[in-house]
Image (cartoon, rainbow, N blue to C red):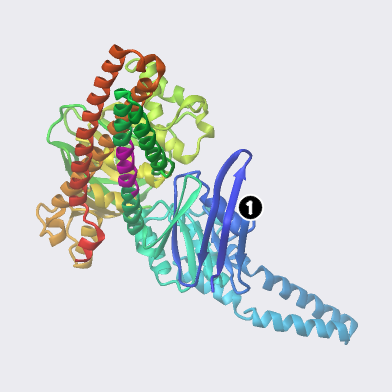
């Protein structure tokens, strides 16, 4: 029996429909990933399920045994200590305890009272059955088990980091006894170590959960079902994120092939219709009418495949020049007010390398990046950039953006001397700022929108060294994939601080793991790093040579494969766009041929017929091009039967 059943749900805000026809069930043991672009309505759906938001149509049903626990993006616990915040999940028991104390005082004052004694007995049973004798001890032990110290139990929650506040939320969930968790971006602000702890917890969780996340590596680890909210509809599949995307891509490919075949058949039939009409005999008109009905029947069943939602499209182009040694760091250390952040950092980054800097929160990654960028001075040691190296810095706090500027002003003020107003508007359009959106104040933008503005400014610098601090924070999956593709094609040098393991796996040539005592180097992506750590492959910082694992040895081959897949997908998309444009043009020509103005003019009709034949031949070539590109893509991405074989 399902814990939750949602049927034909619809939700609107004023004139905008967020979603409609949404139906799904959640049963015990379901670990569901919930994906979709920012603003599509995922968090709103959670609010509807919890009863915090009304809905327009449909139904939401939970069983009597369902206990829903939620984890939100923002912790609201001002004025509460960590212990008080966690203990508040037992507010019902605290109220019963308070009432029992009041009854005890009255009994001492008034003596035996039958009604009070009966009330006391009922409350005591409820208190004990609900775990009242142990809830304080359980609260304390749970917080300590999550890694908090005794001193931190008394600390105000508002003073904790984002990752610590998320852990505090997890403590409440563990204590709540919930068997259905609604988790909204639970990995926000967590470092990799904390994310891996959360993955371990959720993977072994016996209850059910739905988790909203843009962290694809995390979703692959913890989910066995996936839901995607897209264009107001809900798409569901069995399997984790990667499996869902494979199934969706296969479904879209089949839909597209059916659609293109149907359009090709319509075009073929309508070509025969035009030919019959040009011959002009009575029986030709009868044949033409019969053929047209056949084409119309196919057109009535024609459904255009869904299109991908708008996503940012951009590329980074590095200025030419610069030596082979791009970043040279020796004996670097940094302290604030006498407190050491890190020491003993040595680093050499070569031209064209994509290097990722990983480590626990607080180990000094951002501080190191700021020193390399020249924004901070080291306490000891040196950090030097190579000759003719021009860096560009992406800061995760985005404090460089002027909140009083409009989106257009923020870009125009920096580049008005080198880039035309029209080109800046076109660039903003590529980053999904269109029409009046360019006049929106920076202060009013969401985190994802601010990230897009900062990425655009970074792109326009044409720097040959990118220093990126958590560049995928605030971005939805579509925008992350666009950023990854752009960074993959970037021919400059990159040093990136991130907790996005999917990004690391796709792009990294090397990983530098940072602690307070220096750096340790690993070759390859995140999976290679994990394998090396598990095999005891930690080595001293700056080691010139290290034995490569089997997976690391083939890393460059895998990167080349990903690059080939990207190129094949681009070729398919380009062919599809050209086919659509040619078919639109052919349709216009055929409409003219069918009009009285042209059908009665032999010369004009002849010219148009010739033009229609030329377009038809071009379409045939484009279809062949599309089929070749699709076959190439199919070879690079084998279907499921081939994988299983």
In the image shown, does 339 or 406 lie closer to the viewer? Answer: 406
In the image shown, does 214 or 625 lie closer to the viewer? Answer: 625
Q: Main secondary structure of the magenta part?
A: helix
Left/right of residue 91 with respect to residue 321 in the rendered view: right
Count of picture labels: 1
Crowd class of label 1 (few under 14; some 14 to 19; many from 20; radius 10 Å)? some
Whole-percent x, y for residue 348 in the image:
17, 43
From this viewpoint, is residue 372 visible? no
Whole-percent x, y for residue 328 in the image:
18, 40
From this viewpoint, is residue 118 visible? yes
Does residue 259 belong to the magenta stretch?
yes
**In the rendered view, would you say 631 is above or below 205?**
above
- Rendered residue at 50%/70% (across/down): 27
> Which of the 4 quarters of the picture holds residue 195?
bottom left
Residue picked out by circle 1: 57
Left/right of residue 533 with respect to residue 583 in the rendered view: left
**In the rendered view, would you say 198 is above or below 596?**
below
**In the rendered view, would you say 221 is above or below 629?**
below
> Which of the 4 quarters of the picture holds residue 552?
bottom left
Whole-percent x, y for residue 373 in the image:
29, 35
- Rendered residue at 29%/24% (across/down): 279
- Rendered residue at 45%/68% (across/down): 30
In the image shown, does 225 or 336 lie closer to the viewer? Answer: 225
What stretch of residues is rendered in magenta?
Answer: 255-266
Q: Quadrant for the N terminus, please.
A: bottom right
Does residue 411 belong to the magenta stretch?
no
Q: Quadrant for the C terminus, please.
A: bottom left
């Amino acid at each position: 029996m399902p814990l939750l059943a949602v049927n034909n749900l619809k939700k609107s805000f004023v004139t905008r429909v967020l979603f409609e026809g949404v139906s799904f069930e959640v049963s015990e043991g379901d670990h569901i990933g919930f994906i979709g672009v920012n603003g599509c309505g995922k968090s709103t759906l959670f609010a509807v399920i919890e009863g915090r938001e009304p809905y327009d149509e449909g139904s939401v049903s939970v069983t009597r045994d369902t206990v829903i626990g939620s984890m939100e993006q923002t912790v609201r616990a001002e004025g509460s200590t960590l212990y008080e915040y966690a203990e508040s999940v037992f507010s019902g028991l605290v109220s019963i305890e308070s009432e029992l104390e009041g009854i005890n005082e009255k009994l001492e004052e008034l003596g035996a009272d039958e009604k009070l004694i009966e009330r006391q007995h009922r409350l005591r049973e409820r208190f004990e059955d609900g775990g009242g004798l142990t809830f304080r001890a359980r609260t304390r032990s749970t917080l300590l088990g999550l890694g908090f110290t005794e001193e931190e139990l008394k600390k105000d929650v508002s003073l904790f980091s984002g990752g610590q506040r998320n852990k505090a939320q997890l403590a409440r969930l563990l204590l709540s006894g919930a068997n259905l968790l609604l988790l909204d971006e639970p990995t926000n602000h967590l470092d990799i170590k904390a994310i891996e702890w959360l993955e371990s917890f959720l993977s072994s969780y016996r209850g059910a959960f739905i988790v909203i996340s843009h962290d694809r590596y995390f979703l692959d680890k913890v989910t066995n079902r996936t839901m995607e909210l897209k264009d107001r509809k809900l798409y569901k599949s069995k399997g984790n994120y990667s499996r869902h995307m494979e199934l969706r891509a296969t479904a879209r490919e089949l839909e597209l092939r059916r659609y293109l075949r149907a359009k090709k058949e319509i075009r073929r039939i309508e070509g025969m219709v035009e030919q019959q009409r040009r011959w002009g005999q009575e029986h030709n008109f009868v044949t033409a009418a019969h053929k047209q009905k056949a084409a119309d029947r196919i057109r009535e069943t024609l459904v255009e495949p869904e299109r991908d939602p708008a996503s940012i499209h951009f590329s980074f182009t590095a200025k030419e020049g610069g030596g082979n040694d791009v970043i040279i760091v020796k004996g670097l250390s940094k302290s604030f007010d006498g407190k050491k952040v890190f020491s003993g950092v040595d680093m050499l980054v070569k031209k064209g390398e994509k290097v990722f800097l990983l480590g626990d929160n607080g180990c000094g990654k951002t501080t190191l990046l700021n020193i390399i960028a020249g924004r901070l001075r080291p306490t000891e040691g040196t950090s030097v950039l190579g000759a003719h190296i021009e860096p560009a810095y992406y800061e995760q706090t985005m404090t460089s953006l002027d909140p009083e500027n409009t989106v257009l002003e923020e870009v125009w003020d920096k580049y008005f001397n080198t880039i035309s107003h029209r080109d800046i508007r076109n660039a903003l359009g590529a980053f999904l700022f269109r029409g009046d959106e360019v006049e929106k104040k920076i202060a009013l933008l969401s985190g994802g929108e601010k990230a897009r503005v900062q990425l655009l400014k970074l792109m326009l610098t044409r720097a040959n060294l990118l220093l990126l601090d958590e560049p995928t924070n605030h971005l939805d999956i579509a925008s992350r994939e666009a950023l990854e593709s752009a960074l993959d094609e970037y021919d400059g040098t990159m040093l990136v601080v991130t907790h996005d393991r999917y990004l690391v796996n796709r792009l990294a040539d090397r990983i530098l793991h940072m602690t307070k005592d220096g750096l340790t180097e690993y070759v390859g992506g995140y999976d290679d790093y994990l394998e090396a750590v598990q095999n005891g492959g930690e080595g001293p910082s700056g080691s010139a040579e290290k034995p490569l694992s089997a997976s690391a040895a083939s890393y460059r081959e895998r990167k080349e494969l990903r690059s080939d897949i990207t190129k094949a997908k681009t070729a398919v998309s380009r062919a599809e766009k050209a086919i659509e444009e040619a078919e639109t043009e052919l349709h216009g020509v055929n409409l003219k041929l069918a009009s009285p103005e042209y059908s009665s003019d032999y010369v004009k009709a002849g010219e148009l017929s010739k033009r229609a034949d030329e377009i038809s031949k071009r379409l045939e070539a484009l279809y062949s091009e599309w089929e070749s590109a699709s076959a190439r893509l199919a070879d690079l991405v084998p279907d499921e039967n081939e994988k299983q074989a």
